[in-house]
Image (cartoon, rainbow, N blue to C red):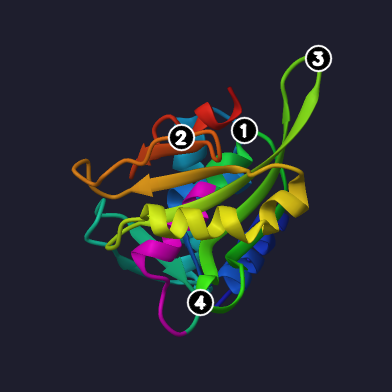
Amino acid sequence: MLMMYLKENDKKILRFVEDNKSITIQICADLFFNKTSRRSAYISASRRLKTLHDNKFLKRFRKTINDEYVYYREGNPLGYHKMKLLEVYSRLSTIGEITRFEKEFVVGTGKAKRKNDGLIEIKVDQGEYINTYAVVIEIDYTHETNWTKIKDIINSGDYQEMYGAMPTILIVKRYEHMKKLNSNSDVEILNINWKLEGIEQLFE
């Protein structure tokens, strides 16, 4: 039996899966096939992941949400919550250059210690200037982010010390009926749906 020849992109995909446990077609398209149109990138990513699966480099299972395949190597694939964080990361990578990506970033101490689902720093070319943004990410899959948590994050002062001001908090809501938190003088908040529609508003 002939062994499959791994292209450079294949190696990058496999390294990503090794580091992050799982990948979907859309994440793969955003990260590794984004030089073409969004539809063409999705088709190319779908074919490549299927080839890697057929040649035993990746396993896969079909998620019930969105009815899509999740590809992985060993153990169990990531759950919906952590997969959505990777999807946020991959979508933002199509908008700018991500210079930092931290999962489960912790701020504060003692009883006020809080864990955010993610922290991203991104450089965005906006014409005359290339601007750098920090984004704190919360994924509301089963539990909703509340003001008690937001206040503890703000009061920790950790983000303000890092960036000189409190970064925007991006909250991804699984359901439309989930309560949306409003921005105030202390923090800018962007609520978006599970499809990540409107995520580019972070940079307006």
Q: Is residue 28 visible?
A: no
Q: Secondary structure at mark 4?
A: helix
Q: Secondary structure at mark 2?
A: loop
The residue drawn where x is 52% and y is 70% is: 112
Sequence-wise first label, 1 or 4: 1
Amino acid at the residue labelled 1: Ile
State the mark number for residue 155: none
Query: For the residues marked 1 and 3, what is the alpha-carbon distance in whole angstroms?
Result: 16 Å
Q: Nearer the viewer, mark 4 or mark 3?
A: 4
Residue that badge 2 annotates: 183
Q: Nearer the viewer, mark 1 or mark 4?
A: 4
Dominant secondary structure of the residues highlighted in magenta in the image: helix
Sequence-wise first label, 1 or 3: 1
Q: Nearer the viewer, mark 1 or mark 3?
A: 3
Q: Which residues are the magenta region?
A: 75-88
Question: What quarter of the picture does the C terminus occupy?
Answer: top right
Question: Is residue 86 highlighted in magenta?
Answer: yes
Labelled pair 1, 2 in contact (Cβ < 8 Å)? no
Above or below residue 185? Residue 6 is below
The residue closer to the viewer here, 94 or 29, is 94
State the mark number for residue 111: 4
- Please provide percent x and percent y for residue 180: 31, 41
Residue that badge 3 annotates: 128
- Please provide percent x and percent y for residue 18: 61, 73
Query: For the residues marked 1 and 4, what is the alpha-carbon distance in whole angstroms?
Result: 37 Å
Query: For the residues marked 2 and 4, what is the alpha-carbon distance in whole angstroms?
Result: 25 Å
- Is residue 138 toward the left or the right of residue 19 in the image? left
Sequence-wise first label, 1 or 2: 1
Amino acid at the residue labelled 2: Ser
